[in-house]
Image (tube, grey):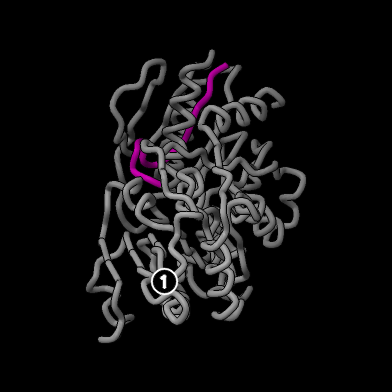
Amino acid sequence: MQIVQIVKRFGLVGGMEEYVFRIVTEFAKLDFQVIVLCEQNCSLPIENVTIYEFGRFEKPRWFAHYKFSQRVNRWLAQNPYNKRIVHSHERQSMHQVTTFHTTPFNQGKPWAWRFLSLRNLFYERLERRELFADSVKAIVPVSNLLGEMIKRKHPKSESLLKDAVHPGVLMQTECHVSKNQTPSDGGTLGFIGKEWKRKGLPKVVGIWRELKKTRPKLKLRIAGVSPEMIAHLFGPDDKDIEVLGLIKDKESFYMSINLLVHPAKHEAFGMVITEALSMGVPVLCSSECGASECVNSANGFSLPSTEKLISWADKASEIMSANSIIKYEMSWQEVASRYADIYSKL
């Protein structure tokens, strides 16, 4: 069987692109002929994988989506193959399987908002085309929460929606931090995220301040955002705060904290959650994160983002005072196996 994977950037560049790279690498180990269609290849050659690079269109973004789609369709038409599954991760129109990685366009905005500009209308059209093109047989969300969002916005998607296929986790270092090592008067809260406002950093700062009343030595370690961007969140009396900025070594960051706090709003998944859990670090996150499906009483807790600050602080203290954690595991081999099962049914 020939498997075609469609993604604009292919390689270890984070997020959706890494998801595609990892499953392609696993498919290459199986009895599949793997082809990648992309705008830009950021990967070294992979055995048993053929990569076609079409070149990039930078702006406007909607036009880049459209031009890439045209080039993909032209290649598929010019290279027919009768035992092929086309699996897209982009806004395409000639695929059998699409993996949805982000919240639906204009999620949470009023219904009329989508008609306020030609840009909005075009993005809505691209989204509907990705989900409901004649060739589409399966829509795979990266979380069941995201699947529910898609179904609410597009009710007719229900018959096409499959169970979520969560991203795999591949961390390079074994973490030796566990909850029972957290000092009763301190410990370290952690936050990581470039989109710090949407991911809830102001709430994390509030939780830390509340916990300092009973844990005077509690530290707050922040990564993924530059210090100058968030300097206004802290006052002259705020001590025990470390802002690391952008980091490459996430393993060391997770190893240095006792609890990851991630109160994001409308997050399709949230890889930092499962990364922390896989290293034995408990998580307190919002139930609006898709990865909250991976959090349970053995490794943390999830709360609605609207819950009062004191409830978040109380739950954070409870988690840090607990005695054990069951680590989360999800291999990319298992992710590829889930997709292979979907392909075989098509």
Does residue 344 show up magenta in the picture?
Answer: no
Examine the rendering and report whether any part of residue 337 can be seen. yes
Q: Position of residue 300 (x, y in %)?
A: 58, 57
Residue 223: x %, y % from top left: 32, 60
Task: Report the residue at 41% width, 44% height from top.
Answer: 176
Note whether residue 270 is visible.
no
Residue 185 locus on image (x, y percent):
43, 70
> Quick one: which residue is furthest to the front in this view?
184
Q: What residue sits right under mark 1 in the picture?
A: 201
Q: Quadrant of the N terminus?
A: top right
| Amino acid beneath label 1 | Leu
Instruction: Verify whether residue 3 appears in magenta.
Output: yes
Magenta region: 1-14
Question: At x 30% / y 64%, what residue is drawn?
Answer: 225
Q: Is residue 340 above or below residue 247?
A: above
Looking at the rendered structure, the number of numbered marks drawn on it comes to 1
**Element type at marker 1?**
helix
| Vertical comparison of 4 with 109: above or below | above
Q: Determine whether, in the image, residue 301 is placed left or right of residue 232.
A: right
Residue in view at x 57 percent, y 50 percent:
324
Vertical order, 343 against 295 (above or below) = above
Q: Position of residue 33 (x, y in %)?
A: 49, 16
Q: Residues within 10 Å of mark 1 (few under 14, many from 20)?
A: many
Q: Quadrant of the C terminus?
A: top right
